Image (cartoon, helix red, strand yellow):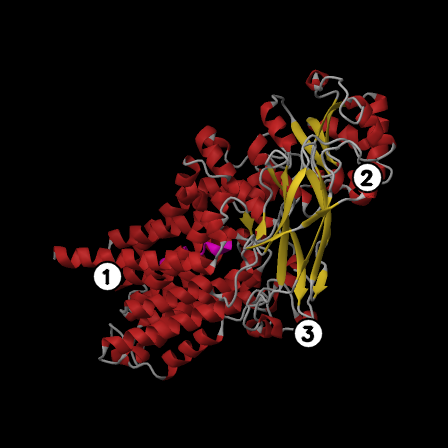
Amino acid sequence: MQNKTASGRARELAVAVFFLATAVLMTWPLVLHLSTAVHDPTDPYVSASILDWDLYALGHHPLSLFDLPVFFPSDHALAFTEHLFGIALVVAPFRLLGFSAIALHSIGMILGFAFCGYAGCLLGRMITGSTAAGVIGGLFYAFVPYRFHHLTHISYVWSGWLPLLLASLIWYAKRPSWTRALTFGAVFFFNGLTCLHWLAFGSVAIALTAILLAAAAKRFLDLRWWLPLGTATILALILLAPWLLPYRTVAREYGMERSWADLKPYSARWSDWFMPPRENQLYGDLVPDEAYEPEHPLFPGLVVLALAATSLLIARREDFPTTGAAGSRFPIAFWCAVLWVAIGILGSFGIHSFFHEALFRLVPLFRGIRVPLRWSMIAYTGLAAIAAAGMLPLLRSPQKVRRIATAGAVALAILLECRAAPIEWTIAPDPLPPVYQWLSRTPFTGGITELPIGERISDYEYLLAQTIHRHPLVNGVSSFVPARYATMTALAHEDPIRPEFVDTLERIGCSLVVVHVDDLYERRPAVRKWLAAELGRGRLTFVRRFDHKLFGDYVFAVTRNCPHAAEWRAPEQSDPSGRTPSMTLQYFLNEDGFTYNVSTFGQLGVPSPGQDIRGTLTVWGWAFSPRGITAVNLLLDDGRVRVPATLSESASLVRHLPWYPATTRPQFTAAIPFVSYAGRTRDIQVEIIDGGGQVTRLDDVLFRWSGERGLELRRVR
């Protein structure tokens, strides 16, 4: 008995290690860039900041978990989006080891893929009795193309609790007991703790499945069958209440419910189930641009459909470890998987079917869900189990070598189809701009407003930076936006900016305004005029300028809320340009010209973000440092390719920036022949090495690159 137990544990460990290793391979080279790599510099920053906040709040003030310090002074801001607490608990040990917010997110992504694979394997094995068949189902579920379409959403990568939910219910139905019911309840709890979408969709699917199982066992009216299961479910919901009630609160206080019109763009059509995601490198380019819509590509893959057909057409009653349902060659567990496929497909149609419409009208939780298309994960859960069953006819051979070879071939086919080339990762800023280090050391009450506000990229970066300084942010990012924040954004975007903007800052308790000059773009003239006017009225107080990019970051205090901010000002000493901090401020306000940077800085001119390049890539840019520039390297494709650039003199650049005599060759160039690469979007990052040996990396830039006769380029995502 002990040998069998030890053998079973060794098997489980081997399966878990297999899926972890496969997750590392399928997300490569993420494991090499845990602290800097994200799929996109938007939603991953939000998720990283939430994971960081969950763990920070858990250790410092757990009763204020939902008071995420964004959209200041809104209450329960964490309830504007997914709380991710179940994922935060998994990555908590890495936080104790000192990993950054981005690293926690990266580790969570890898573990999410691995967990989905292992959970899908358990479900497949529960139905088929075969570990090899279960592994095939797990591989599909872990790396279904739709999951790669949602690499920016860690909560959707973490859907492993869904197959465990179905598996634990099937396990309970085989021999009902309180122990098995409590196991089901635990899975139900952690599913709800991880993702509200999976709580909502999974609850409906599991309720209908329980009815099917009870009816099949002819125990539909048997209280002894329902009592343990119902008790465990109610207990799980009671335990989930602290994570659910804040959502009801914000729905009531802020009116945060979806309208029928919100759901229409995200409701599926039949054609969506035949549309592959653009991220799929095998056939993602087959969909024309005009027909492609984000969220809509639901095609699960050819291999899994072939396995599903095999299970339905070739599988026999004796292939399964349990007898088929009455009049069927399939066990009832198989039909549970079929039910999940039907539920997932029907639910994905959203307003185009009665199913989701009824739930939207009757169940409050569903009125907070914007994308019915994500019901597809319920269908993929069932499809993973059906695919595992499709392996049974292929594994009938009495020869072990042949069975292993068959399973290996199918596994390889799934992996190649789901991901045929490296994933496109973007390098996040590391370290963050110096202003955030200063904020982390500066004690004050009230919030921070950062300009520009309400921009697509900037607000995401502010949330990431909040994990460093910990002060409340007026800014925020969410699909739900408080009315106050929408009003503030509208005021900040006016030209000219009216005094009402500062009135609002004073009223809500904002203490500091941080202006990121380089990110203002066409808003710079309006913001400069507004700053000059409010400084003249004494309602804003200049505090400091910090190096960042070319023109720097400026910090101002809202005088009424932070009357002592002038004490934080830097000494009025001249820098190498001959200007004191006050003179630098006036030069920015009046002339909008270059000011002096203590740190190394530069700019990449070509390629620009989103630019289409054909043939040879001609790179051009410039860099300055008070310590001089020793070398510039160009890092392509997540840093996998390193190309030294050529440094040269530039009289025009030196004329505009004469304060860096040590920098005699500020211009860098390189001509890089086209390198074949399966990805459609490429990235390049400039690495600058100054005279003191210090390394500075500019922001990662995404562009498109093809050969002279490459395929017609598609727009950048």
Could you tell whether 445 is left or right of 146 in the image? right
Q: Amino acid at mark 1?
A: Arg
**Mark 3 and mark 2: Cα distance apart in space:** 41 Å
Front residue of 404 and 248 = 404
Residues packed near mark 3 inside 10 Å, few (<14), some (14 to 19) or many (20 plus): few
Q: Quadrant of residue 678?
A: bottom right
Would residue 462 be seen by someone viewing this image from the given angle?
yes
Front residue of 238 and 122 = 122
Q: Closer to the observer: label 2 or label 1?
A: 2
Secondary structure of residue under mark 1: loop
Front residue of 545 and 74 = 545
Marker disc for residue 175: 1
The residue wearing badge 3 is 709
**Mark 1 and mark 3: Cα distance apart in space:** 63 Å
- Tell whether position 162 is magenta: yes
Q: Quick check: 93 above or below 203?
A: above
**Mark 2 and mark 1: Cα distance apart in space:** 69 Å
The residue wearing badge 2 is 524
Q: How many marks?
A: 3
Extreme residue toward the bottom, this view:
313
x and y percentages locating residue 221 in the rendered image: 31, 63
Would residue 487 be seen by someone viewing this image from the given angle?
no
The residue sitting at 75% across, 40% down in the picture is 518
Q: Quadrant of residue 334?
A: bottom left
x and y percentages locating residue 588 in the rendered image: 82, 31
Q: Amino acid at mark 3?
A: Arg
Query: Quarter holding the N terminus?
Result: bottom left
Tell me where the magenta segment starts and ends, as one range. Answer: 156-164
x and y percentages locating residue 87 in the rendered image: 44, 46
Q: Amino acid at mark 2?
A: Arg
